[in-house]
Image (cartoon, rainbow, N blue to C red):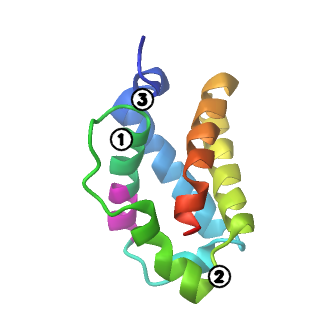
Amino acid sequence: MESLYQQLGGAAAVEAAVDGFYNKVLADDRLRHFFEGVDMSRQAAHQKRFLTYAFGGSEHYPGKSMRQAHQRLVDDMGLADQHFDAVVENLAATLEELSVPAELIQQVAGIAESIRDEVLCR
């Protein structure tokens, strides 16, 4: 069976999704403040590597753990469930715009839910 990464369309699909996703996030009043001063090219590259791994396109992820990557945002900026929900909402909307089938979007949402507690440092 093909991995979710392959079903979504591989590297080109992840690239398009991440680029569209960050356009939405940076326009979202609930989220944009978390990215002030962030090198978005670097951030997008990290996200592409992470999603490639999370969707089964790579066997290992060279980045920080979700807890390490988000601890400062939780402690200093109040990153919480409502922000996580907004991220998932923006990701799903991006995938819908890219004509990703609903069942694959549900799989992506399930992967996101599986890391909620780590991202929110609980």
Considering the image in quadrants, where does the N terminus appear? Answer: top left
Q: Which mark is residue 24?
A: none
Q: Residue at x 37, y 29 (%)?
A: 10
73 w.r.t. 59: above or below: below
Q: Which residue is mark 2?
A: 78
Q: Is 63 included in the stretch rendered in magenta?
A: no
Counting residues from the start of the chain, the first of labels 3 and 2 encountered is 3
Q: Which residue is mark 1?
A: 53
Residue 84 spot, x, y in % from top left: 66, 61
Q: Nearer the viewer, residue 68 or 49?
A: 68
Could you give the CA–CA distance between mark 3 and mark 2, rounded to whole angstroms?
31 Å
Residue 14 spot, x, y in % from top left: 43, 39
Asked whether, in this view, residue 12 is left or right of residue 107, the answer is left
The answer to whether residue 93 is visible is: yes
Q: Residue at x 44, y 61 (%)?
A: 66
Asked whether, in this view, residue 51 is left or right of residue 89, the answer is left
Label 3 secondary element:
helix
Q: Mark 1 is on which residue type?
A: Tyr
Q: Which residues are magenta?
A: 40-46
Q: Mark 2 is on which residue type?
A: Gly
Q: Nearer the viewer, residue 66 or 122?
A: 122
Residue 40 spot, x, y in % from top left: 40, 68
- Whether tag 3 and tag 1 are in contact, CB under 8 A, the answer is no
Could you give the CA–CA distance between mark 3 and mark 1, rounded to whole angstroms?
8 Å
Could you give the CA–CA distance between mark 1 and mark 2, rounded to whole angstroms?
27 Å
Counting residues from the start of the chain, the first of labels 3 and 1 encountered is 3
Instruction: Tell me if mark 2 has few (under 14), some (14-19) or many (20+) residues whose alpha carbon lies within 10 angstroms of its own.
Output: few
Instruction: Tell me if mark 3 has few (under 14), some (14-19) or many (20+) residues whose alpha carbon lies within 10 angstroms of its own.
Output: many
Residue 27 spot, x, y in % from top left: 65, 67
Label 1 secondary element:
helix
Q: Which residue is mark 3?
A: 5
Q: Quadrant of residue 29?
A: bottom right
